Amino acid sequence: MLPEHFVPALVTALAIKFPEFIPLLDSLPITGDELWLVKDEVILGLAILSFIEELAIRNPDFAQLIEKIDAFIKFAAILAINNAMLDPQVLEAVFNHAGPTGSTAAVIGVAVSTPVIFLTRLRKNLLAYLRDLDGGNDLGLISLAN
């Protein structure tokens, strides 16, 4: 069973980016201009991942495929977000460099994104162990872990 996280994240990002369409939200002191969540690249990524998530919910065969390549999808998503969000000032501070070059940005992106594969596999193994302990989710361990 896949967790459903991308659609709420997409709705939240859109609500922050366009508060004028949500009653009472435009009166709150939220300025989404500086948030990474409302950048166009992040919203596009969330939209794509939301679409994939919805397909997986509706099609069990597609869900099994996604479960197999889940770590690599997350890696690619994090790598894309890192690439879009990497600030040239960070590169300058880390490498005493004048701005992002393709190779430097890629190295930092891969270094930051690679733990996602490990953490995804760790989570998958933990969920498998919890399914063995609580197959019918009687104790609610699987619901708690998701």
Image (spheres, rainbow, N blue to C red):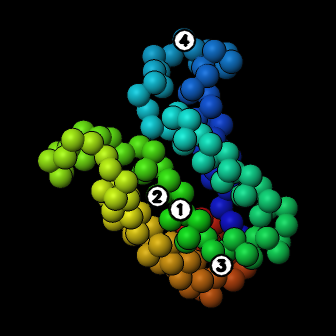
* Sequence-first tag of 2 and 4: 4
Q: Whole-Å distance between the Cαs marked 2 and 4?
A: 35 Å
Determine the secondary structure under disc 1: helix
Residue under the point 51% across and 16% down: 28
Determine the secondary structure under disc 3: helix
Amino acid type at mark 1: Ala
Determine which quarter of the picture holds residue 105: bottom left
Q: Whole-Å distance between the Cαs marked 3 and 1?
A: 14 Å
**77 and 133: which is toward the camera:** 77
Whole-percent x, y for residue 59 in the image: 85, 67
Residue under the point 44% across and 75% down: 118
Name the residue that disc number 4 marks. Answer: 27
- Circle 3 or circle 4, nearest the eye: 3
On the rendered structure, is 69 left or right of 80? Answer: right
Query: Residue 79 — which label?
Result: 2
On the rendered structure, is 85 left or right of 92? Answer: right
Find the residue positioned furthest to the left. Answer: 96
- Circle 3 or circle 1, nearest the eye: 1
Residue 127 appears in the picture as rendered: yes
Determine the secondary structure under disc 2: helix
Find the residue positioned furthest to the right. Answer: 59
Name the residue that disc number 3 marks. Answer: 68
- Circle 2 or circle 3, nearest the eye: 2
When the figure is inspected, residue 20 is found, relative to residue 62, above or below; the finding is above
Name the residue that disc number 1 marks. Answer: 76
